[in-house]
Amino acid sequence: MSIARKLRPTLILFAMCAAPAFGQDWGVGASIGYANDVEHRVRLRDFDPRDVNAWVDFRLEERVLFRATLGSIRTAGINSGLVTDIGGEELELPGFKTNIDYLDVAAAYTFWEGDFTSGLFGGIGGYKIDPDRVDPEFREFQDREETVFGFHAGIDGDLRVYSRISIVGRITFHKIFTDVNRSLLTANVGAAFRF
């Protein structure tokens, strides 16, 4: 079952509650960035492309935004590159890759400082784990294909470059409750347009 189908009631409620906000302050944006599996360690050299996402947000109060984000992370599989015993022989597993598609909703608290706005955010979402196909002898070592729940939190900054256009930088921690629990850190840069 797809993430959108599982979150359909939330999206319908979101649309009903957000309708009055269309006349107020809302925005859209997109970003691209790097992702790093930080379940066991954090190293800068482990950041690999790609995290791509788009979002829509609504200003609920002067400093509070409600944001829905749709995105896709391509990252190394959980057992990628590990050395293991296969048929009595030690082998290094190939570099498995996994796509993680997600739909998150979050609340953000912003600190306005003129043309620059910083903020903290956090929320929940659905994550669809979709590993690349591998040879049959390696299937037991790749990530499981599944749709799961998770949460995310992070910081962001927004630099206005024109009256309604800004450059956005965002660092997000995703905790994904798969059978092996994934923790991903993403760093993105993008653009946003405020209506």
Image (tube, rainbow, N blue to C red):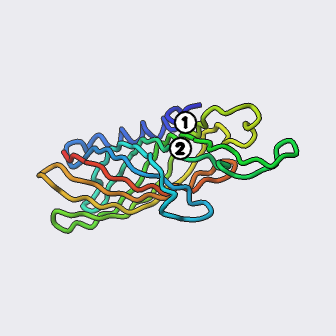
- Label 2 sits on residue: 126
| Label placed on residue 132 | none
For the residue pair 159 and 37, the one nearer the viewer reads as: 37
Q: Is residue 97 left or right of residue 107?
A: right
Q: In the image, 56: left or right of 49?
A: left
- Quarter containing the C terminus: top left
Which amino acid is tagged 1? Answer: Lys
Report the disc number at residue 6: 1
Q: Nearer the viewer, mark 1 or mark 2?
A: 2
- Secondary structure beneath dot 1 equals helix
Disc with the residue nearer the chain's start (1 vs 2): 1
Residue at the right extreme? 88
Residue at 34 percent across and 60 percent down: it is 156
What percent of the width, then of the height, locates residue 18?
Answer: 32, 43
| Residue found farthest to the left | 163
Q: Tell me the distance, in whole angstroms, between the alpha carbons under discs 1 and 2.
A: 8 Å
Q: Mark 1 Cα within 10 Å, few/some/many (few <14, many 20+)?
A: few
The residue at 18%/49% (across/down) is 165
- Could you tell me how many numbered marks the image carries? 2
Instruction: Rate crowding at label 2 as few (under 14), some (14 to 19) or many (20 or more) other CA atoms within 10 Å.
Output: many
- The structure residue drawn at horizontal position 27% and vertical position 58%, both measured from the top left corner, is 61
**x and y, in percent, of residue 36 in the image:** 51, 55
Amino acid type of disc 2? Answer: Gly
Give 30 or 91, whichever is nearer the viewer: 91
Look at the image and tell me in which quarter the N terminus lies: top right
Between 58 and 30, the one nearer to me in the picture: 30
Above or below, 31 against 131 in this view is: below
Q: Position of residue 119 (x, y in %)?
A: 33, 64
Q: Looking at the image, do the residues carrying marks 1 and 2 touch, with CB atoms under 8 Å apart? A: yes
Out of 107 and 48, give the one closest to the viewer.
Answer: 48
Residue 192 place in picture, x, y as percent: 25, 48
Helix, strand or loop at label 2? It is strand
